[in-house]
Structures are given as C-alpha cells and as structure tokens.
Image (cartoon, helix red, strand yellow):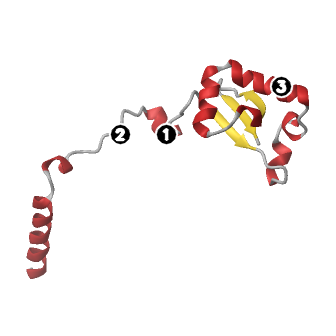
C-alpha cells in the first residue's frame, strides 16, 4: 500500500508540473485520412529516381534510362523545362535539369523522373 501511495504522489507531482497546454491533444496538422494512410505528397506528385550504372535494379529501368540517346535526353529535359511544377519539384530536391535522363507519367497522373 505504501508503494501505491508513493507512486500516486509522484504521478500527481509530475502532472502538476506540466503546463496547461501540454495536457491537450496533439493536432495532426490538417492531414486528411488519405495522407495519413498513404503519406503526404509534396511538389505535385513527383517521384525522383536516381540511376546508378552499377545498381542492382538497373534491369527495371526503361531503355531510355539505361541507354540514353541525345534525342531522348533532349525530350526529357524539354518536358521538365515546359512544366513549371515539375521544375519546382526538381529544384526542391536539388536536381539540375541537365541531369534528367527520362520523364514518365504514372498511372495516377504523377511524374516519375529518372536522373543521374
């Protein structure tokens, strides 16, 4: 019984020392249930994939990424420069336009950018 009284007194002292605002609930920051379940998507639903020549998953890349030509590089870099939201998304990630190898459109309408 003595241990219970000591534990209760310690808990009461701990909660008394907390400020009044700390006892309230934590807000989720305005996230929707979709964002909580699947993650928050930043910068217009853009996925950037860094391509390493000796990487294990190099077999899964499109042929334009594995063997880029001058024409495919120009097409990809032009697609980035023509889309301001895509350009902003790459700037946030620190990816220069001249490093873009290929741009694909995903099934959900987002962009997949392969870069070196």
Considering only vertical position in the picture, is 84 above or below 69?
Answer: above
- The alpha-carbon separation of the residues under discs 3 and 1 comes to 37 Å
- Give 45 or 82, whichever is nearer the viewer: 82
Residue at the disc numbered 1? 37
Question: Few, some or many C-alpha atoms within 10 Å of disc 2 (few <14, some 14-19, many ≥20)?
Answer: few
Left or right position of 45 against 77: left
Q: Quadrant of residue 44?
A: top right
Q: Residue at x 13, y 49 (%)?
A: 20
Location of residue 82 (image quadrant):
top right
Q: Disc 3 on helix, strand or loop?
A: helix
> In what element is the residue under mark 2?
loop
Q: Mark 3 = which residue?
A: 74
From the viewer's side, name the closer residue of 53 and 78. 78
Is residue 9 rendered to the left or right of residue 79? left
Element under label 1?
A: helix
Q: Residue 65 occupies which quadrant of the picture?
A: top right
Residue at 70%, 28% in the rendered image: 106
Circle nearer the N terminus (3, 1): 1
Mark 1 or mark 2, earlier in chain: 2
Give the class, few, some or many, for how many residues have Cα within 10 Å of label 3's Cα (few <14, many ≥20). some
Instruction: Give how far across and how far down residue 90 sits, in percent.
Output: 64, 33
Q: Nearer the viewer, mark 3 or mark 1?
A: 3
On residue 28, the disc is 2
User: Of the residues tagged 3 and 2, which is closer to the observer?
Assistant: 3
């Amino acid at each position: 019984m003595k241990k219970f009284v000591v534990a209760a007194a310690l808990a009461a002292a701990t909660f008394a020392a907390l400020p009044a605002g700390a006892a309230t609930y934590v807000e989720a920051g305005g996230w929707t249930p979709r964002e909580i379940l699947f993650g928050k998507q930043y910068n217009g639903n853009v996925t950037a994939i860094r391509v390493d020549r000796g990487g294990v998953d190099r077999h899964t890349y499109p042929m334009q990424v594995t063997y880029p030509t001058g024409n495919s590089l120009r097409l990809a870099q032009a697609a980035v420069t023509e889309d301001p939201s895509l350009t902003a998304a790459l700037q946030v990630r620190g990816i220069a336009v001249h490093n873009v190898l290929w741009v694909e459109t995903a099934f959900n309408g987002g962009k997949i950018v392969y870069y070196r």
